[in-house]
Image: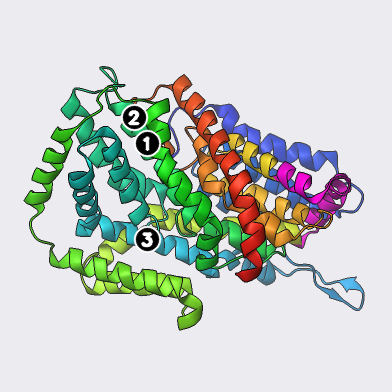
């Protein structure tokens, strides 16, 4: 999110005040003063990411620079029983380590791939094709939108690019055909299509590791905190039963909880058919993008078989898109969202790892772990899952949420009596996508649909809570037993 001109001054002051207050409280027993300095900086970072008085990437850059200046957050090195002081060179090397992180570059590359879908026109062709065949009824139109998002999800992990950049332009062109506008007949079909488009993106974001940017980041941060999880294929298998069930029922749920006044829409199918005809035969760029996408999917699914790292695959896709002139080198350099997210994630990764380096997560786990030992494994896991989901209300970014919470909950998962930390963390991380539905600011695409005005504020919050509860209950009843069964086989 970009900085706003009328940002209140208190939003600028709040991160500084919180950081200073945490510092003045003083380090508790079990933590050093240098560790507490880093905790203070991290607390200010979290408040800054929640309030966003300025671009999140810039906030992350400030936090990492302060940590480097104070030389805190780095791994502790001991020699002959004494702690070796961190040099300035070691500090800046740690501060910039996120820029060499493979997951960060995978997310960066995904934004570039999104530009390829837009430039080639392949995304628009897929959407119109599905609407043409499934758009004869409002419910069928809903499934057409859902299928479009599902097809694009493995390749475009940016919610804003996938839903806001590809789906939204199609939907915004459909609503006026039925005299449905934000301020005139919104419930005729506009509110239904708006909520459906929003909700289906949350489901597709859950199904694939590359379905939304925070997914691979969360897996990386969990690994940095000591719990290694699953590959792209493992993630898909672990969430598939819940994901596909939610995919099937979301259009139906929306149809009954946010019903359109127009039940049939043959005009939509006719419009899509006309627009699809105008596209003509597939262009050279569309064919090239389709083949490149197929190659990427094969390499991502078979990464262990082919011995190709997923990030390497993403870089190959970028190179092929440039070579086939789907994107130009100027497009590559001018993709500000991609460079912004690269800077953002590259600062957040070492900051999150720093909590473990200074011993804060171990200290906190020892404090909180005492409470978990009094609960059986199932209740403790459910408690962690519900807490992990409810905290979503306090974050205006999935990335900020992951950065602040994953390290902490990973350590807490290791203290659940009789529990498997990998199984518990997988149960927490898999529903991250669907839980973004709770608020109109939870992920990158949420504000796009909220700002459209078809679903008003109170209704938006009500639907978010209803869908969130339904999604979570289904995940608990179906998803958690499946994870317990399938994890040993992944």
Under tag 1, what secondary structure? helix
* Residue drawn at the location 19% of the way across and 26% of the way down: 178
Answer with mark 1 or mark 3, whichever residue precedes in sequence: 3
Judge the density around disc 1: few (<14), some (14-19), many (≥20) Cα neighbours within 10 Å.
Answer: many
**Position of residue 399 in the picture relative to residue 199 (left or right):** right
- What range of the chain is rendered magenta? 357-384
Q: Residue 464 placed where, x, y %?
A: 50, 31
Depth check: 137 or 121 in front? 137
Tags 1 and 2 in contact by the CB under 8 Å rule?
yes
In the displayed structure, would residue 457 be above or below residue 316?
above
Find the distance from the CA under tag 2 to the CA under tag 3: 26 Å
Answer with mark 2 or mark 3, whichever residue precedes in sequence: 3
Find the distance from the CA under tag 1 to the CA under tag 2: 6 Å
Q: Residue 101 placed where, x, y %?
A: 55, 68
Name the residue beneath numbered marker 2.
192
Under tag 2, what secondary structure? helix
Quadrant including the C terminus: bottom right
Residue 383 among magenta residues: yes
Is residue 307 visible to the viewer in this orientation of the structure? no
Number of the front mark, 1 or 3: 1
Would you identify the image quadrant in which residue 123 lies? bottom left
Depth check: 49 or 406 in front? 406
Depth check: 132 or 8 in front? 132
In the displayed structure, would residue 427 be above or below residue 486?
above
Name the residue beneath numbered marker 3.
155
User: Magenta stretch mostly in which secondary structure?
Assistant: helix
Residue 386 badge: none
Residue 196 badge: 1
In the displayed structure, would residue 329 be above or below residue 137?
below
Is residue 170 visible to the viewer in this orientation of the structure? yes
Would you identify the image quadrant in which residue 92 lies? bottom right
């Amino acid at each position: 999110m970009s900085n706003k001109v009328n940002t209140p001054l208190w939003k600028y002051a709040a991160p500084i005040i919180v950081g200073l207050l945490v510092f003045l409280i003083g380090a508790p027993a079990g933590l050093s003063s240098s560790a507490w300095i880093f905790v203070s900086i991290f607390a200010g970072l979290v408040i800054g990411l929640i309030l966003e008085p300025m671009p999140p990437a810039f906030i992350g850059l400030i936090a990492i620079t302060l940590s480097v200046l104070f030389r805190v957050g780095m791994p502790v090195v001991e020699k002959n029983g004494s702690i070796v002081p961190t040099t300035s060179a070691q500090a800046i090397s740690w501060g910039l380590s996120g820029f060499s992180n493979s997951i960060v570059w995978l997310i960066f590359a995904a934004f570039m791939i999104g530009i390829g879908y837009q430039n080639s026109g392949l995304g628009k062709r897929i959407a119109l094709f599905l609407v043409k065949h499934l758009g004869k009824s409002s419910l069928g139109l809903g499934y057409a939108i859902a299928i479009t998002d599902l097809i694009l999800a493995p390749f475009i992990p940016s919610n804003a690019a996938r839903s806001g950049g590809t789906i939204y332009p199609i939907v915004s062109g459909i609503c006026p055909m039925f005299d449905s506008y934000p301020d005139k007949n919104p419930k005729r079909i506009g509110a239904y299509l708006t909520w459906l488009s929003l909700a289906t993106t949350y489901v597709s974001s859950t199904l694939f590791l590359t379905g939304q940017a925070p997914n691979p980041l969360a897996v990386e941060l969990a690994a940095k905190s000591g719990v290694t999880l699953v590959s792209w294929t493992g993630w898909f298998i672990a969430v598939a039963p819940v994901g596909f069930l939610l995919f099937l029922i979301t259009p139906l749920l929306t149809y009954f909880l946010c019903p359109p006044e127009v039940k049939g829409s043959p005009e939509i199918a006719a419009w899509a058919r006309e627009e699809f005809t105008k596209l003509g035969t597939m262009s050279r760029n569309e064919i090239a993008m389709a083949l490149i996408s197929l190659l990427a999917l094969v390499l991502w699914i078979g990464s262990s078989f082919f011995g190709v790292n997923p990030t390497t695959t993403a870089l190959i896709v970028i190179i092929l898109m440039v070579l086939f002139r789907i994107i130009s080198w100027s497009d590559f350099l001018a993709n500000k969202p991609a460079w912004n997210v690269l800077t953002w994630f590259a600062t957040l990764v070492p900051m999150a790892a720093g909590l473990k380096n200074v011993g804060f997560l171990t200290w906190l786990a020892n404090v909180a772990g005492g409470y978990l030992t009094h609960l059986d494994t199932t209740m403790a896991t459910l408690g962690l899952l519900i807490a992990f989901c409810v905290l979503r209300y306090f974050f205006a970014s999935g990335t900020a949420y992951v950065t602040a919470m994953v390290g902490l909950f990973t350590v807490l998962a290791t203290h659940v009596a009789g529990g498997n930390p990998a199984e518990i963390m997988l149960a927490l991380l898999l529903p991250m996508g669907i839980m973004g539905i709770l608020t109109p600011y939870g992920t990158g695409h949420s504000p796009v649909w909220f700002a459209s005005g078809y679903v008003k504020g109170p209704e938006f919050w009500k639907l978010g809570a209803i869908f969130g509860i339904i999604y979570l209950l289904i995940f608990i009843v179906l998803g958690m037993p499946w994870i317990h069964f399938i994890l040993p086989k992944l």
